[in-house]
Image: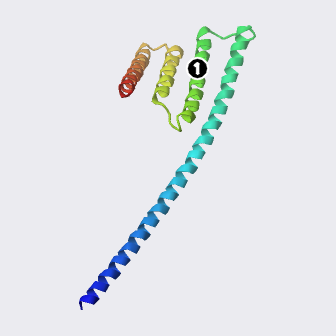
């Protein structure tokens, strides 16, 4: 009777080991599938960002052509605000392209400070373009202050780490 219990125990242990091995194999397969899916999505994201960078580069060149035409007086801005708005739009294009470049340089990571730069530039553009309502101008200015303070906090925290 003891031998039967012992052999039954051995069979259970072997079956348990086989079950564990099968579960481990299944986990590895699932993990491999997840990694494959993540790699595919990463490639789709990369291609999309490259297409966006190309589009932004074309728009950036279009703004440069406008500035050259304005400089040689082939084209007049209707007012100085329009010229200033186009300059700020130029910098927005430039910052987005720089953000995409940094994304690839930083191993597929967007640095937060670049979003803050873009936000500050966009808010300055809003103040220049839509300056008729003093309350809105004050709110835009407060938003810039929050963005600058956020940048300061991030910079201070980053310098403490290093």
122 in relation to 47, above or below:
above
Marks counted in the figure total 1
| 160 or 77: nearer the viewer | 160
The picture places residue 114, in percent across and down from the top left corner, at 50, 26
Q: How far from the left and from the top, in percent, is residue 29? A: 49, 62
Q: Is residue 38 above or below residue 140?
A: below
Q: Is residue 135 left or right of residue 48?
A: left
Residue assigned mark 1 = 91
Q: Position of residue 130 (x, y in %)?
A: 51, 16
Coloration of the structure image: rainbow
Residue drawn 69% across the image and 28% down it = 58
At label 1, counting other C-alpha atoms closer than 10 Å, the crowd grade (few under 14, some 14-19, many 20 or more) is some
Image quarter of residue 96: top right
Quadrant of the snapshot with the C terminus: top left
Of residues 162 and 140, the one nearer the viewer is: 162
Question: Residue extending furthest bottom?
Answer: 1
Local secondary structure at mark 1? helix
Q: Quadrant of the N terminus?
A: bottom left
> Which residue occupies 50% across, 55% down?
34
Q: Residue placed at 35% from the left, 82% from the top?
A: 11
Q: Residue furthest front?
A: 3
Left or right? Give the position of 5 relative to 56. left
- 56 or 2: nearer the eye? 2
Q: Is residue 136 above or below residue 72?
A: below
Q: Position of residue 129 (x, y in %)?
A: 54, 16
């Amino acid at each position: 009777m003891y031998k039967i219990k012992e052999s039954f125990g051995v069979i259970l242990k072997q079956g348990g080991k086989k079950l564990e091995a099968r579960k481990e194999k299944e986990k590895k397969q699932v993990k491999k599938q997840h990694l494959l899916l993540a790699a595919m999505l990463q490639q789709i994201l990369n291609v999309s960002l490259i297409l966006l960078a190309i589009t932004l580069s074309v728009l950036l060149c279009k703004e440069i052509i406008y500035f050259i035409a304005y400089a040689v007086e082939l084209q007049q801005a209707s007012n100085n605000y329009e010229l200033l708005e186009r300059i700020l739009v130029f910098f927005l294009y430039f910052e987005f392209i720089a953000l995409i470049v940094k994304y690839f340089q930083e191993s597929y990571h967007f640095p937060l400070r670049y979003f803050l730069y873009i936000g500050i530039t966009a808010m300055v553009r809003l103040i220049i373009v839509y300056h008729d309502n003093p309350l809105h101008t004050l709110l835009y200015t407060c938003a810039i202050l929050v963005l600058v303070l956020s940048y300061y906090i991030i910079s201070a925290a980053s310098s403490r780490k290093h």
